[in-house]
Amino acid sequence: MSRIDQVYRHSGTVPLEGVLLMAVYGGVGAAVAGILSAWLYIYSPVVSVLFALLQAFFVGWAVKVAGRQGKVRNTKVLFMAGACAGGASAAIAFLVSRHFLAQAARPGGDPFAVGINLYILWGTAAPLILAVAGYLPAAMLDSLPFCEQCNAWIDQQTDYLCTPA
């Protein structure tokens, strides 16, 4: 038996409950983070570039929480759910900021916030948000062992092992 065979690996199970939870939590997280990010962009475009990372972390964390509650043990599914939620969040932020900037095209406004700059900002922020929001839940849950007999995550406070009946 080689050393590589002794490393713990998840079973790759994806319960339906986990998929539904990730869709709901990811959707809500995407909407909240996207609207907040658009609002921030309207009032301070420079700060919103920094907030794109926080937006990605928030969306990825929401998907991670849902994946853990739903007992999803497939890192590819976790990555795709996070990336989809991150993409939705970036799209919401772009569309909301574009809508409000068109509504508020005011004289003397910030020239950075309108026109091609909006597309450049969200065109560069969107891949970052997708990557971070996808990587975060997959990496965080991949490092946690799962007991298939107990059907539970094993964390540091758990000091027992399940044995087959």
Image (tube, grey):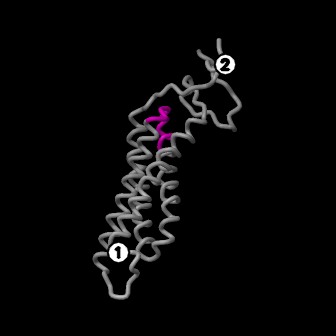
Q: Is residue 26 left or right of residue 104?
A: right
Location of residue 21 with respect to 95 vertically, above or below = above
Say whether residue 141 is left or right of residue 103.
right
Element at label 2? helix
Name the foreground residue: 33 vs 124. Answer: 124
Q: Quadrant of the C terminus?
A: top right
> Between 161 and 19, which is closer to the camera in this rendering?
19
Three-letter code for the amino acid on which mark 1 is drawn? Val
Q: Residue tagged by mark 1?
A: 114
Q: Residue furthest top?
A: 1
Image location of residue 116, percent across then percent down: 34, 69
**Which residue shows up at 32% across the image and 69% down it?**
98
Of the pair 119 and 3, the residue shown nearer to us = 119
Foreground pick, 145 / 70:
145
Q: Are marks 2 and 1 in contact (CB under 8 Å)?
A: no
- For label 2, the crowd category at 10 Å Cα-Cα, with few meaning under 14, some 14 to 19 and many 20 or more, is few
| Picture coordinates of residue 69, whole percent (x, y) | 50, 41
Numbered badge on residue 3: 2
> Does 31 sit left or right of 75 as displayed?
left
Magenta span includes 95: no
Give amino acid for label 2: Arg
The tag on residue 23 is none
* x and y percentages locating residue 68 in the rendered image: 52, 40
Quarter holding residue 126: bottom left
Residue 14: image location, x then y, percent: 43, 31
Pick the quarter of the image with the N terminus: top right
Q: Kindly identify the residue that appears in the image at 51 percent across and 70 percent down.
A: 47
- For the residue labelled by badge 1, is the local secondary structure a helix, a strand or a loop? loop
Magenta stretch in the rendered image: 66-76
Name the residue: 56% across, 22% down: 149
